[in-house]
Amino acid sequence: MKKIIAVLDGLNYSSSTVEYAISIASQEMAHLVGVFPTDISYRSYAFEDLVDESGVSDQRIKDFAEKDRRTRQKSIQQFELACQQSGLNHSLHKENDTAIEAVLHESIYADLLIIESREAFNRVKEEKPSHFLSQLLAEAVCPVLLVPSEFTGISKSVLLYDGSPSSVHAIKMFDYTLSSLKHLSAEVVSVKSPKSSLHLPDGKLMKEFMKRHYPQATYQVLQGIPWEVIPAYLHGVGASTIIVLGAYQRNRLSRWFFPSMADTLMQELQSPLFIAHCK
């Protein structure tokens, strides 16, 4: 039995994360853990909300803290009710640590981590990916499934492949982690420069490998700059297509000059992204 964790913000409950998590855990006959980090530095209110005519109000502090406590408790109840209604084997973890440290620690002992792509654990709205999500993707020890804010299900897989060990590793982890999706149609997408041939990188070895895992897979070789042509191509595959890629291997300086494919896809698409990388 696999262990899947769904990371949830108790102050901003993501029903989409729960729907994807329950759907996948049910298909994989996995144990689902709802992880609710309770970060002491993260709350729903600003400092100025605590101030009245006499200064910082102790009563307001208590009132706002109690409101957050009730909101978090309601989110936990929603998660547990959804799992119970689905008959899913599940449990709950409430972590009293900084959100990122709690989630990274949980990832050590999980087969898959599911989280919404706009998650930030921050009262202030951030552009995708948030600082929290960027750090999570760079340091998570298990594969991460980023899901959109609306549940659409999964009907197809697109496997991004560039000939690198990281891209092959991501496909291996996808096959191992989400074996229940093997019956769906799968497409391998690669990109080469305009002056190159349209042959798949390491084509003989790759097709030999894929034949053992996704024997009915089709292949598409595009030409151009990857972070331009891939999003354009994927716009046509639909929101129910899961996209598999290796990502966040490069250091911070490298990502400054060359956009991360995961960042680009998060910003431009509403499809689930399965991300795994070699450490």
Image: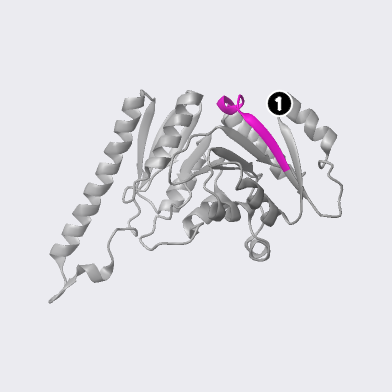
Relative to 78, is 64 on the left or the right?
A: left
Q: Is residue 170 visible?
A: no
Q: Is residue 234 above or below residue 41?
A: above
In this view, the residue in front, 133 or 223, is 223
In this view, the residue in front, 234 or 55, is 234
Relative to 262, is 118 on the left or the right?
A: left
Q: Is residue 6 above or below residue 222?
A: above
Under circle 1, the secondary element is loop
Q: Is residue 97 above or below residue 204?
A: below
Give how far across and how far down residue 69 sits, in percent: 23, 50
Residue depicted at 40% across the width and 37% down the height: 18
Instruction: Give the residue number, with chain letter if any, for mark 1.
Output: 216
In this view, the residue in front, 224 or 264, is 224
Magenta residues, start to end:
179-189
Query: Which three-letter amino acid code belongs to the residue tagged 1?
Result: Gln
In this view, the residue in front, 185 or 247, is 185
Q: Magenta stretch: residue 186 in it?
A: yes
Q: Is residue 89 visible?
A: yes
Residue depicted at 35% across the width and 36% down the height: 92
Give how far across and how far down residue 83 sits, in percent: 35, 30
Considering every residue shown, the one lying at the far front of the view is: 236
Q: Magenta stretch: residue 92 in it?
A: no
Q: How is the image coloured?
A: one colour
Where, by quadrant of the figure, is residue 61 drawn? bottom left
Say few, some or many: other residues with alpha carbon within 10 Å of mark 1 (under 14 / 14 to 19 / 20 or more).
Answer: some
Relative to 198, is 78 on the left or the right?
A: left
Residue depicted at 48% across the width and 61% down the height: 127
Where, by quadrant of the figure, is residue 150 drawn? top left
Give how far across and how far down residue 53 sits, in percent: 13, 76
Give how far across and how far down residue 165 sits, in percent: 74, 43
